[in-house]
Image (cartoon, rainbow, N blue to C red):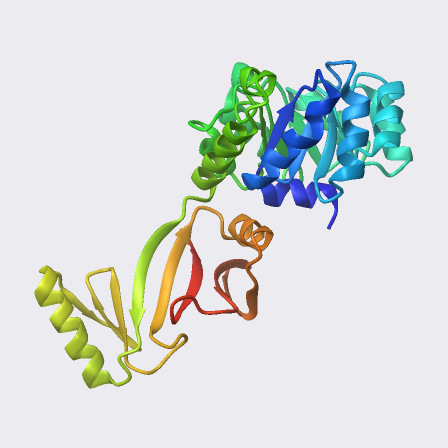
């Protein structure tokens, strides 16, 4: 998997400035523990190069970018230290050319159509938008995306847990960069648990898991109807007959035949099934490829390979 695909699946890229190189590895461990094995270490400090080197050597599983790269010298030092991609706040043709000539992924900063056309002239498929909120936010990105259908955007600047879904819900947004998961006072205090908690909260909000319904293996049309009617009577909900099931309200699906799972299945809805799958795989879960359902070429349903508590579990795109 290339670095840009990893960034896209992670959804969020913590942007961090390291002042003490000793903080680099425990900080990235904290981010990984919270669900984001990815980081953009910025060249805003003198410790950046060594911080990248240490993370690359000790945490090779972390998708590592170098940020705020302003010169080819910084780009070369970052790549030599172990950065897999270069990110810059503006469009520096020399930096972009240096990266393109060496096959190194680069996301230069853009803020208008001219910048994007420059990126296209270098063959780029993804650009940073900075400072995103200050220059128009998601409305600007949607407007810019219209004439540049093949371009993807990495907005950074002013993004936080409250507004990130406005960006991530737009399919042309590659990922969002942000520093709110890594507050300076937490780094200074070496409060790695706080950073893990903030990261976990951001990932949870991004994925937006919700229990959609519980499927019950009633086993026959007659039993499915009876089970649905009892649940509906208990809860005061309507019964909705279907081709393979009877629903009691929207929460219980009584199956006419034995389906997946010893007892049935549990449907979990998510904001982005593609990202949710990746994040759950990072947690060690395995999915059943044969269970994938699609609509208009996009995945809408996928089951875990193994049951939990006798129930098959499937993700469902909201």
Position above or below: 104 against 248: above
Position above or below: 209 against 140: below
- Residue at image position (81%, 38%) is 57
Residue 198, given in percent of the width and then of the height, sits at 49, 30
The quadrant holding residue 226 is bottom left
Position above or below: 203 against 238: above
Residue 61, given in percent of the width and then of the height, sits at 72, 44
The quadrant holding residue 217 is bottom left
Tell me: 315 left or right of 14. Answer: left
- Residue at image position (80%, 19%) is 92
Residue 232, can we see it? yes
Tell me: 11 left or right of 160. Answer: right
Tell me: 162 left or right of 233. Answer: right
Which residue is at the front of the view, 123 or 196?
196
Residue 159, given in percent of the width and then of the height, sits at 51, 24
User: How many numbered dots are placed on residues in this image?
Assistant: 0
Residue 174, can we see it? no
The quadrant holding residue 174 is top right
Which residue is at the front of the view, 224 or 83?
83
Residue 73, given in percent of the width and then of the height, sits at 89, 19
Tell me: 5 left or right of 299. Answer: right
Position above or below: 277 against 265: above
């Amino acid at each position: 998997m290339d670095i840009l695909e990893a960034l896209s699946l992670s959804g969020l890229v913590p942007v961090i400035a390291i002042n003490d190189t000793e903080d680099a590895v425990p900080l990235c461990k904290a981010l990984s523990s919270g669900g984001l094995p990815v980081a953009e270490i910025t060249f805003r400090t003198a410790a950046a190069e060594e911080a990248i080197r240490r993370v690359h050597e000790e945490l090779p599983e972390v998708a590592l970018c170098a940020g705020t790269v302003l010169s080819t010298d910084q780009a070369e030092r970052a790549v030599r230290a172990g950065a897999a991609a270069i990110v810059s706040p503006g469009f520096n043709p020399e930096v972009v050319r240096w990266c393109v000539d060496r096959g190194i992924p680069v996301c230069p900063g853009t803020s208008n159509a001219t910048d994007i056309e420059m990126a296209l002239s270098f063959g780029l498929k993804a650009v940073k938008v900075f400072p995103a909120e200050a220059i128009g936010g998601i409305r600007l990105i949607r407007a810019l995306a219209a004439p540049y259908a093949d371009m993807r955007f990495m907005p950074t600047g002013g993004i936080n847990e409250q507004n990130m879904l406005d960006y991530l819900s737009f399919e042309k947004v590659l990922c969002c960069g942000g520093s709110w998961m890594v507050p300076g006072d937490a780094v200074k205090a070496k409060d790695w648990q706080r950073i893990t908690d903030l990261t976990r909260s951001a990932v949870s909000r991004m994925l937006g898991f919700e229990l959609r319904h519980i499927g019950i293996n009633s086993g026959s049309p007659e039993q499915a109807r009876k089970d649905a009617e009892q649940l509906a009577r208990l809860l005061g909900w309507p019964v909705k007959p279907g081709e393979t099931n009877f629903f009691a309200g929207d929460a219980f699906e009584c199956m006419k035949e034995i389906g997946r799972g010893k007892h049935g299945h549990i449907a979990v809805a998510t904001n982005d099934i593609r990202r949710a799958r990746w994040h759950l795989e990072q947690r060690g879960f395995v999915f059943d490829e044969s269970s994938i359902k699609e609509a208009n070429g996009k995945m809408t349903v996928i089951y875990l390979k193994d049951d939990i508590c006798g129930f098959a579990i499937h993700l469902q795109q909201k």
